[in-house]
Structures are given as structure tokens and as C-alpha cells.
Image (tube, rainbow, N blue to C red):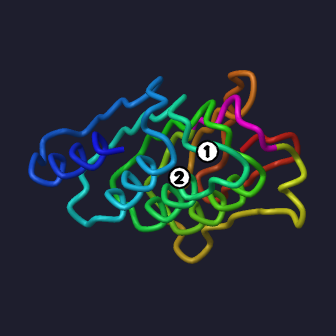
Amino acid sequence: MLVVLALCSCLRTNQTVRDVDLSRNPLIGAEGAAFMGRYLEDRDCRLECLLMSQTTLCAGETDKKGVFGMAQGLKKNQTVHTLALADNGITNWGARELAVALQCNVTLVSLDLDSNFFDDEWLRPAHTLHTEMDPSIRSIASCVLRNGELSMVPQNVRRWEHGGSL
């Protein structure tokens, strides 16, 4: 966790780093993910690619601060276009939080949620995310959710469809 805090502090002063890969680092944990989420909210954030697969973002069903922090960061972030959160124990609750965040985010183009623990249950009620306010708003163009399958979506609609595909 302290490593992520120090990294976020360095990223605030070093505006040239655009890609960060923290994958396969279980010591990041939920608290580290929450710190990274706060950094994503920062208007000085310049990250374009953040890879956080296998970082124990959700240490358990009751530990929600990691995915909640990342979702909050995504709501305000205007720079990240690629985000990998695969194999982090994200549950139905976390999938809903991320879906809500994606309603506000207009820059994310690729999201990897492969090998997490959510299922179709989180779709009730159905979550269809529209970006009709402004037709020029970019939306997610691809999302890897299960078994490495990549789904493409029209630019003006973000839809989480039955079966966990976006």
C-alpha cells in the first residue's frame, strides 16, 4: 500500500509517465487500489494505460474499498483509455459500481475484467449505459470480460449485455 502511495506522489510530479503496470502484485490490495483511484480523480493525472490485473483489488466479499475507489476515480478521470482489472475478485457489487462509473467516463476505450467473480445476477435491473447527451462523446469500444473474448460496441452506446459481454 505504501508503495502505491509513493507511486501516486511521484506520478503527480512526473507528468511524462503515461503507462503503469502493477499487475501480478498482490501486495497492492484494496487499500493500494483505493489510493490509485484517488490519483485517477486528480486533475493532474496523465495516465493513459493502467494495468492492475491480479492485484487483490478485492481481498474478499466484505472488502469493497478497492473497487469502490477505482470506480470513483474512473468517474472523474479524463485520461485513462486502457484499464485492466482482470482476476481481482470483483463481485456483482463491484461490477455495478464500475458500470455506474462508466456512465460518467468518456475516455475509457478498453476495459479488461476477465476472470472475476461477477455473473449475470448483477444485470438486474438491466444496465444499459447510453451516452445520448452528446453524440460526440466517445464510449468504450472494447471490453474483455470472460475467456478472453473481445466484444465491440457502437461508439454512441455502451451496453453490458447478457452473458457478461460489453
Q: In this view, does 98 lie above or below 11?
A: below
User: Looking at the picture, which amino acid does disc 2 mark?
Assistant: Gly
Say whether residue 72 is magenta.
Answer: no
- In the rendered structure, which segment of residues is drawn in magenta? 112-118
Q: Is residue 44 left or right of residue 88?
A: left
Residue drawn at 38 percent across, 31 percent down: 22
Q: What predominant SS class does the magenta segment belong to?
A: loop
Work out whether residue 154 or residue 106 is closer to the camera in this orientation and state it: 106
Say whether residue 115 is magenta.
Answer: yes
Instruction: Report x, y in % for residue 107.
Output: 43, 55
Q: Earlier in the sequence, mark 2 or mark 1?
A: 1
Q: What element carries label 1?
A: loop
Residue drawn at 51 percent across, 48 percent down: 30
Q: Name the residue under label 1.
A: 58
Q: Name the residue under label 2.
A: 66
Residue drawn at 36 percent across, 64 percent down: 41
Instruction: Report x, y in % for residue 58.
Output: 61, 45
Circles 2 and 1 in contact, beta carbons < 8 Å: yes
Task: Mark 2: give few (<14), some (14-19) or many (20+) Cα within 10 Å.
Answer: many
Q: Is residue 108 left or right of residue 87?
A: left
How many numbered marks have been drawn onto this rendered protein structure?
Answer: 2
* Furthest residue toward bottom: 133
User: Looking at the picture, which amino acid does disc 1 mark?
Assistant: Cys
* Furthest residue toward left: 13
Instruction: Report x, y in % for residue 5.
Output: 27, 49
Q: In this view, does 117 lie above or below 124?
A: above
Work out whether residue 11 or residue 46 is closer to the camera in this orientation and state it: 11
Residue drawn at 62 percent across, 38 percent down: 143
Task: Mark 1: give few (<14), some (14-19) or many (20+) Cα within 10 Å.
Answer: many
Work out whether residue 5 or residue 137 is closer to the camera in this orientation and state it: 5
Residue 2: assigned label? none
